């Protein structure tokens, strides 16, 4: 499991609603919710994933596809418009 920015006590966002938080540097525009990561882990631990082997599951809101320019230093959504 390779999570991106997740709203949790470890990231200092335990009181933040991730569905309302703006993160311009994340393609989905918000941090992840710990329940979203838990759902992926539950799937991987379930019989439905019995044929999955040796894989890394990335749940990062699209940050990996952004490359090094993604992250908290992006302060506006200007990059989203052509």
Image: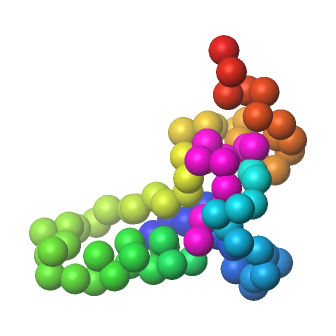
Residue 77, can we see it? yes
- Residue 40 occupies which quadrant of the picture? bottom left
Quadrant of the drawing holding the N terminus: bottom left
Q: Residue at (54%, 39%) from the top-left corner?
A: 65
- Residue 44 occupies which quadrant of the picture? bottom left
Q: Residue at (75%, 60%) from the top-left corner?
A: 21
Quadrant of the drawing holding the C terminus: top right
Left or right relative to 67: residue 36: left
Residue 64 coordinates in the image, percent (x, y): 56, 46
- Residue 29 magenta: yes
Taking depth in this image into account, of 23 and 64 the one nearest to the observer is: 23
* Highlighted magenta segment, given as a residue range: 24-33
Q: Is residue 77 above or below residue 33?
A: above
Q: Is residue 36 above or below residue 14?
A: above
Residue 11 coordinates in the image, percent (x, y): 77, 75
Taking depth in this image into account, of 63 and 75 the one nearest to the observer is: 75
Residue 64, can we see it? no
Residue 48 coordinates in the image, percent (x, y): 15, 74
Report the predominant secondary structure element of the magenta stretch: loop
Q: Is residue 27 above or below residue 51?
A: above
Left or right relative to 12: residue 8: left
Q: Is residue 28 above or below residue 39?
A: above
Left or right relative to 23: residue 19: left
Q: Residue at (76%, 34%) from the top-left corner?
A: 77
Residue at the far top: name it.
Answer: 82
- Residue 47 magenta: no
Left or right relative to 40: residue 53: left
């Amino acid at each position: 499991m390779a999570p991106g920015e997740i709203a949790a006590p470890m990231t200092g966002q335990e009181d933040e609603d991730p569905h309302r938080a703006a993160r311009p540097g994340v393609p989905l525009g918000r941090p992840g919710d710990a329940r979203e990561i838990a759902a992926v882990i539950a799937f991987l631990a379930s019989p439905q994933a019995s044929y999955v082997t040796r894989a890394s599951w990335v749940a990062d809101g699209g940050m990996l596809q952004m490359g090094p320019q993604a992250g908290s230093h992006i302060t506006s959504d200007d990059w989203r418009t052509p």
